[in-house]
Image (cartoon, rainbow, N blue to C red):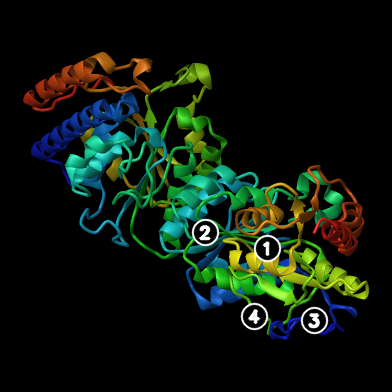
Amino acid sequence: MAVTDTQIEYLEDMATHIREDIIIMLEKAGSGHSAGSLGTADIFSTLYFHIMKHDPKNPDWEDRDRFVLSNAHICPVLYATLAEAGYYPKKEITTLRKLGSRLQGHPHKGALPGLEASGGPLAQGLSIAAGMAMAAKMDDKRSKVFCMVGDGEMNEGQIWEALMFIGKNRLHNFTLIVDRNNIQIDGFTEDVMPLEPLKDKLTSFGFHVIEVDGHNIRRLIEAFEETIFEKPKVLLAHTIPGKGVDFMEFKPEWHGKPPNKEEAEKALSELEQLRSLGGKITCEHE
Amino acid sequence: MSNNLNKKFHLAENIFDSPDQVPARNGYGEGVVEAGEADKNVVVLCCDLTESTRNAKFKETFPNRFVEVGIAEQNMAGLAAGMAFSGKIPYMSSYATFNPGRNWDQIRVSICYSMANVKIMGAHAGISVGPDGATHQAMEDIAITRCLPNLTVIVPCDYWETKKAAIAIAGIKSPVYMRFGREKIPVITTDNTPFQIGRADTYREGDDVTVIACGSLVYEALIAAEKLSGDGISVRVINCHTVKPIDEKAIIKAAKETGAIVSAEEHQVHGGLGSAVAEVVAANSPVPMEYVALMDRFGESGEPNELMKKFGLDSKGIIKAVKKVLKRK
């Protein structure tokens, strides 16, 4: 089904809202991961507001599609998305990382509606998501499972254990999104522990791999909707860490740091401008 | 035949004679099939050890509910958590050295922190795995599971108890770790022996000292108690199959009534049943305690009975500990 320009504009606008929420919550929290959260906002908008079947009023709906964030340190983007979708009151975003908050520094399943798994130690989410896809397959359910991993996260051995399992069982209800932003804490992924040729590796594990610009919502929708019979799918999503906030883009120092008050104001005014331009983010990968 | 055995537990009549010898893992294998018959959500995940972990019968009975994971214990823990979040009751199996040894971080976060309804089955536990040597002798698994919030830890004493526990754990909606050994061990309970998760069972009454044991050491404790009664020492024997949550009431009662305690387990001295008992005793009713356990060293290759003897994990070791603790009383 063709996606209208209005729909795309709505999703782009939603991505900007999500980015604004991220800036607000991280500034208030005083710690947390900015770059990866901002860099994946377009993917989250596309998933939660167009692709996935889910019901914020009934988060435990049995036949829902599920999303597991394996690179769980970028949970501000997930928390912002869940708030925008109506899983919990938006005013709560300012409690991130504070004592008594449902928005734990890393997600705690059961604490907040809409969280499908706890996470933090890398690679665990991929196995959990694979287990959900396996259970759905066993029961002949139509629900789909989506999982995001970071590229640096793919250093973990458990990632490849899980990929082997998904490939072996041909979990066609499974879509993996690799946040390919090329940066991890100690530097560029190809210097720290090279992943390339990543597409070939994933293909050889039995996946249908689609390379996509992680900021082009139209392309993301097409990639998510591409069906390949009896094969799990990977979106190798090229993203820019810090995307949407000029002074954060491609700057490794923003991996694990929040904006201070002044920086947050600057970021929010940039995002505001972006919105008044109709939410258009240029697509470097096109 | 002792008169001091607690009749309500219907223990095997031939305990002190020539008890049947059956591996506890066989009880698991039969129990998990019964659990599977009772609830279609029961599934089994296994890491390339289907036969030795006694999952072959489940696989044969429910081929569509058996998941071969390959040699990947970390992935197995996550898969099990994900399946549990989708309503399954996964039993995930491997050797106790790897599961919960190799996948402890996954058990901590994917399973326990999220209250995933996963049953972690640690097979070939203890030093009695024998010739494979120290690498394969899980002697730390109780310690590393007991410390995890939300996790129940069960160490059944024989074939029947393992079977009953394997069935019972499907009925509690929280994660469970259960460990059992490879070797044939005496069958001391019967089909009629009551079993309840979280309740320590006083198998033998006594007034002078209490031996609190789990797993294969429960039998050794009963043998030790019989021998000591010849010396005029009255020994209470408690089967503390649930190490967590531990039955504090039974332990405090034993401390108050007998005034001395010996713990006995096929596990390291640090962090296991003995430590769990000591925590309760120290906080509530301090009495002298001695520990029968592996004394902070690694095991080695050898025949199971040779190893149990060498490291004092037998009735002789228990008798020695009882005599020592009584001197301190």
Name the foreground residue: B15 vs B63: B15
Q: Within 10 angstroms of label 4, few (less than 14), some, or many (20 or more) residues?
A: some
For residue B4, the mark is 3
Question: Closer to the N terminus: mark 1 or mark 3?
Answer: 3
Q: Considering the numbered disc 1 on the image, is that residue within a helix, a strand or a loop?
A: loop
CA distance separating discs 2 and 1: 15 Å
**Is label 4 in contact with label 1 (beta carbons under 8 Å)?**
no
Q: Please indicate whether residue B2 sits to the left or right of residue B140 in the image.
A: right
**Is label 3 in contact with label 2 (beta carbons under 8 Å)?**
no
**Residue wearing tag 1:** B155
Name the foreground residue: B172 vs B72: B172
Q: Please indicate whether residue B164 sits to the left or right of residue A75 in the image.
A: right
Three-letter amino acid code at the position of disc 3 = Asn
**Chain of residue at mark 2:** B
Question: Closer to the N terminus: mark 3 or mark 2?
Answer: 3
Three-letter amino acid code at the position of disc 4 = Pro
**Residue wearing tag 2:** B175
Three-letter amino acid code at the position of disc 1 = Val
Name the foreground residue: A145 vs B214: B214
Which one is closest to the eye, mark 4 or mark 2? 4
CA distance separating discs 4 and 3: 18 Å
**Is label 4 in contact with label 2 (beta carbons under 8 Å)?**
no
**Residue wearing tag 4:** B194
Coordinates of residue B179 in the picture (x, y in percent): 68, 60
